[in-house]
Image (spheres, coloured by chain):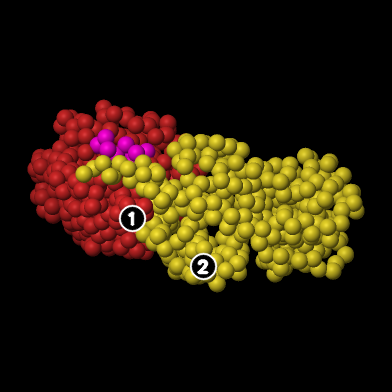
Chain colours: A yellow, B red
Amino acid sequence: MRIAQIAPLTEAVPPTLYGGTERVISWLTEELVDMGHDVTLFASGDSVTRARLEAVWPRALRLDGRVRDGNALHMMMIEQVYRRAHEFDVLHFHLDYYPFSLMSRQPTPFITTLHGRLDLPEHQPLFQTFDTPALVSISDAQRQPIARANWARTIHHGLPPTLVQPLPAQPAYLAFLGRIAPEKRADRAIRIAQACKLPLKIAAKVDAVDQEYFEAEIEPMLAWPGVEFIGEIGDADKSAFLSGAAALLVPIDWPEPFGLVMIEAMAAGTPVIAYRQGSVSEVVEDGVTGFIVQDEEQAVQAVARLGELSRPAIRSRFLARFSVRRMAEQYVELYREMLEGAPRDPQQLDGACGSMLNVA
Amino acid sequence: MRIAQIAPLTEAVPPTLYGGTERVISWLTEELVDMGHDVTLFASGDSVTRARLEAVWPRALRLDGRVRDGNALHMMMIEQVYRRAHEFDVLHFHLDYYPFSLMSRQPTPFITTLHGRLDLPEHQPLFQTFDTPALVSISDAQRQPIARANWARTIHHGLPPTLVQPLPAQPAYLAFLGRIAPEKRADRAIRIAQACKLPLKIAAKVDAVDQEYFEAEIEPMLAWPGVEFIGEIGDADKSAFLSGAAALLVPIDWPEPFGLVMIEAMAAGTPVIAYRQGSVSEVVEDGVTGFIVQDEEQAVQAVARLGELSRPAIRSRFLARFSVRRMAEQYVELYREMLEGAPRDPQQLDGACGSMLNVA
């Protein structure tokens, strides 16, 4: 199948630093190549892929200080994809709502994976207006605020099985992984570890927008006994970091759309103790791959029950449910459905063209 | 003529506070109504107009803290305009590049007035890709970085003649009006006034992004003798502020696309002493409505020559060159040209529809 993946230009694919969306696009793209598809990736020129790379701008915008208005380049990219749409069987966008208007006026099937939260006030009128483009949610929970949008599938993210793997280790600490941000609640993780009298290792980045929060709320707690802040880590360090952890704490306080860290932990065989928010109850199997809790007291009780869980079984559940191959196969199935359902007759297309035909 | 004006949702039309683009859209819209046209204004719901208001979102986004991603609403607005485009003879957009892709695929003529600077690196590939939509520049100078884009006209801004008027006064100070920002160089204005031994009154706002610059560079100079900082002023105060000024100082250090303050001063009969940058040599008639200078020494010399200029003559030149009626008439002339040149045959339309017809 001739597939176009259209990625944000904000980060390279894969990203040189943090960037969940671009990591997932990279894994999907490479897996589709492995499956024998003819894949073209529209992305920044510093992306690395075995697909055909269409470099819309030489460098990821987050690292290119010269560009003030990245949206100008995203609108240009969508126009370029439109002009070449006939070269592809299916177009897969990762650019939120930006392609909806234009791509609805051309015949190549297109889908959009929504990677972010959808509970802001602008989302209601937005998806009422754009009620025909086919959407993929990354969890069922993500859909809730706009349940009546045109959902085609929920497709959970998947990882390459070799990305994070169990290493021999004696689990000796609790782990926190990702970003320090108000909605991630590292403070809860610290208190839970204290109550359990276990060390806590925090591997996390602090974005510029969260620096003030970090200094005011989290930094003072880093001096508590047993707490160790090791900064941001890359994929290469995650197998060791997670294999050494008795559990990953995910005490979130927001509607997490997916939460890649949870499946990274499972890939290492590490149990996940997560608050029941957003995608958590779809990702964590309570009593099998971890425990789902409601507050700090329950989290502490869950730590006491970690002995009930089998780390090899967690790795097995990861392989069965969250491999990149499963994700790619689900997308290919959707692409095929879109292709079979694609209009062969311009009359069936959105009103756009119809009204143009009446001009003469 | 059935005319749609499509404004940013960022500020109301007219804006409750600062907002050059939305002020110009408001003046143009009301003047077109006065000229007997059937005008529809797509804008935020707190806009005030005698045209038909299509409120795309209830409040100006700058004042609506709930909305995190205003672009979602702008993309939705463009889709809504597209669906109703057949109701209008011409569409006039003030949304930068956002409408280009979609509006190129429908038959109602559309123009875009570009209100900002065009010298950033993203502008080169952007206007190479979008080389067919008709563009209006607000000065010839504004075009320079992308001289080969599809320019239809330069149309200088115009003001309602009653907005700012000469009041009886004995001009007793030099004036600085607008924003405190690095490119506006209030520091130069302060030094020029000092060298002339004249008081300087600064009527200006300080944006959040410029607060640090203000505190570091400008605030210490406000204590200099004769310098008075009176904060932001509205249109109601400008006649008195400018009538009392011997000259308006515009010592800019960037490619100013237009510079409304210059014609506001002329409307009061007040001479303008401006640095030769961007639009200045198109707006100021050297030796008639003010003086064009290159440095602080020349600015000081220009102040000494203010007696050569006639304030009634400056007001006359304002009325002849920068009235809102002149601006509106130029736009109507362009709308008519677009209408006469509009394709009646879908074959002439952009490839978009052609390729759709080949699908069957």
Amino acid type assigned to the residue bearing label 2 in the image: Asp
Q: Amino acid at mark 1?
A: Asn
Label 1 resides on the chain identified as B
Inspect this view and state whether residue A245 appears: no
The quarter in which the C terminus of chain A is drawn is top left
For disc 1, the marked residue is: B358
Q: Secondary structure at mark 2?
A: strand
A42 lies left or right of B328: right
The residue that disc 2 covers is A38
Marks 2 and 1 sit apart, C-alpha to C-alpha, by 24 Å
Up the image or down, B124 lies above or below A99; here it is: below
Q: Which mark is residue A101?
A: none
- Residue at image coords 44%, 38%: A129
Is residue A325 or residue B114 the one in the foreground? A325
For the view shown, which residue lies furthest in the top direction?
B50
Q: Residue shown at 29%/29% (left/top)?
A: B52
Left or right of A239 in this view: B5? left
* Magenta stretch bounds: B80-88
